[in-house]
Image (spheres, rainbow, N blue to C red):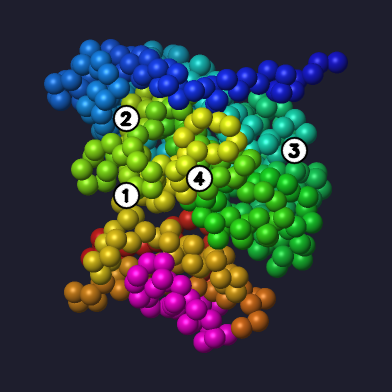
């Protein structure tokens, strides 16, 4: 009998490599991908030549910060031309491309992502790090409740599950009730979803199927797409609802699956530093941040992706360095995971505001349902924040009784006042993939 357990082949040497040796490896890999991009991509050659930069300028670690960053808009401008549809960003002959995916387009025109078979193997390997660190093994039966379509995340999750030996159940064509019944029927032990859908599935399970999600046998839930699984109140709500461990990870179509929470559940995400270089830059000055607990924007390089390289890509995400994890991995920790996006962190009434802080408040009060909506608008010259919430059916309280506690927590966590609207349960929008709960209408006025 063939034993296909990944445990027989797993080599933890990179995850526990001493920091000084890890930096040597990263510097070598950075220079390799930099030269590849410069020599094979018309996009990178154009950006670097315009800045008067060549790969030969990189002689020390600190020189990395002189390499021009890449914006998502650079991809958009380079693509949709010959060789169609990747244009100037493609670094290999078109016939070597074996995988097509694209971004969701939630922030504008989608970016087309080509991968060679080697690139796709690299994708799956980086995702295998995520799954293995979270305890996924050959004994797991993993349900994936999405139609994968042209988006990359669940394709990668599917193949990485197979790589570590899990059994995979693709549940894309089923509706939510059918997915829950299939989880029950097949005794799935784990599933993957956005935090929004994790809670939405539980709501459907209780209210439509009259089943307790805690009794379905799910032991692990891997979240993606939103910061929720790194927000303590949201993570706690999901874990209590399903009686399962909830793990976060972070990735992007253009980058790869570059960060993950391990089974020790530190207050943050490990950066997969064997596969990626992650830098934190001051949001205002663009200077590197080395100290702990100082927020910065995340700049990422993927070391081993060649069809369309990702070199010093401005992810627009915000985080901070945290203390090392006790799991034994030497990969650094991003404290609190992703705190939000640079374009979502804005000033309201002169106060620097992040929508993530409101989620922590709402999800931390058990009488509220899982959904809420946050709208920033302007009345005359005054900023107005409206928070729309629903009471849970089992809340056993009134809006008038819970309102003072909500206002107190919001003031404490954000130093701002809100207009609170209570809506009937089930009336606010429900989402399956990425939720759009925050709306800044000032940008549209």
Task: Give the spatial CA distance, label 2 vs label 3.
Answer: 37 Å
Q: Residue 342 shows which numbered tag?
A: 1
Distance from label 3 to label 4 (Cα)?
26 Å
Task: Work out whether mark 3 precedes mark 4 in sequence or the reverse, and give the earlier one.
Answer: 3
Label 3 Cα neighbours within 10 Å, binned few <14 / some 14-19 / many ≥20: many
Q: Could you say which quadrant of the image residue 313 lies in?
A: top left
Q: Is residue 101 left or right of residue 158?
A: left
Res 225 visible? no
Residue segment shown in magenta: 398-425
Is the residue under label 3 in contact with that under label 1 (CB below 8 Å)?
Answer: no
Q: Are marks 1 and 4 in contact (CB under 8 Å)?
A: no
Could you tell me how far apart the alpha carbons at marks 2 and 4 are, in whole angstroms? 22 Å
- Element type where label 1 sits in the image: loop
Can you tell which mark lies on residue 268?
Answer: 4
Q: Which numbered dot is residue 312?
A: 2
Name the residue rendered at 72%, 65% in the picture.
206
Residue 380 image offset from top left, x and y in percent: 20, 77
Check the picture and name the quadrant holding the N terminus: top right
Coordinates of residue 152 in the picture (x, y in percent): 51, 35
The residue drawn where x is 33% and y is 43% is 297
- Rounded to the nearest whole Å, what is the CA distance between mark 1 and mark 4? 19 Å
């Amino acid at each position: 009998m063939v034993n296909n357990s990944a445990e027989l082949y797993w080599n933890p040497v990179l995850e526990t490599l001493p920091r000084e040796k890890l930096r040597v490896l990263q510097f070598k890999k950075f220079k390799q991908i930099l030269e590849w991009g410069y020599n094979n991509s018309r996009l990178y050659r154009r950006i670097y030549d315009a800045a008067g930069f060549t790969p030969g300028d990189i002689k020390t670690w600190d020189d990395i910060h002189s390499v021009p960053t890449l914006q998502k808009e650079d991809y958009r401008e380079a693509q949709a031309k010959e060789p169609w549809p990747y244009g100037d960003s493609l670094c290999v002959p078109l016939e070597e491309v074996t995988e097509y995916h694209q971004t969701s387009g939630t922030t504008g025109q989608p970016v087309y992502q080509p991968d060679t078979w080697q690139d796709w193997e690299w994708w799956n390997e980086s995702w295998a790090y995520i799954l293995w660190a979270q305890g996924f093994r050959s004994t797991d039966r993993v349900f994936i409740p999405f139609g994968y379509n042209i988006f990359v995340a669940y394709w990668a999750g599917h193949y990485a599950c197979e790589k570590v030996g899990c059994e995979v159940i693709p549940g894309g064509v089923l509706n939510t009730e059918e997915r829950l019944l299939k989880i029950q029927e097949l005794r799935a032990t784990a599933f993957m979803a956005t935090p929004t859908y994790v809670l939405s599935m539980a709501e459907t399970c209780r209210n439509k199927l009259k089943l307790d999600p805690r009794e379905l046998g799910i032991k692990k839930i891997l979240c993606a797409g939103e910061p929720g699984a790194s927000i303590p109140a949201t993570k706690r709500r999901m874990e209590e609802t399903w009686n399962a461990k909830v793990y976060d990870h972070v990735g992007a179509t253009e980058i790869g699956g570059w960060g993950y929470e391990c089974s020790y559940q530190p207050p943050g995400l490990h950066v997969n530093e064997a596969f990626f270089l992650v830098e934190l830059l001051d949001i205002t000055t663009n200077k590197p941040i080395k100290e702990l607990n100082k927020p910065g924007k995340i700049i990422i390089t993927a070391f081993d992706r060649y069809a369309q390289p990702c070199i010093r890509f401005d992810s627009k995400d915000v985080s901070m360095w945290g203390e090392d994890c006790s799991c034994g991995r030497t990969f650094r920790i991003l404290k609190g995971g992703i705190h939000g996006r640079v374009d979502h962190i804005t000033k309201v009434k002169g106060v620097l505001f992040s929508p993530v802080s409101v989620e922590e408040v709402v999800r931390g009060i058990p009488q509220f349902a899982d959904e809420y909506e946050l709208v920033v608008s302007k009345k005359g010259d005054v900023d107005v924040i409206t928070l729309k919430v629903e009471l849970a059916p089992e809340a056993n309280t009134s809006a008038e009784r819970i309102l003072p506690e909500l206002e107190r927590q919001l003031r404490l966590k954000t130093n701002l006042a809100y207009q609170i609207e209570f809506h009937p349960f089930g009336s606010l929008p429900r989402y399956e993939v990425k939720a759009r709960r925050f709306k800044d209408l000032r940008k549209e006025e």
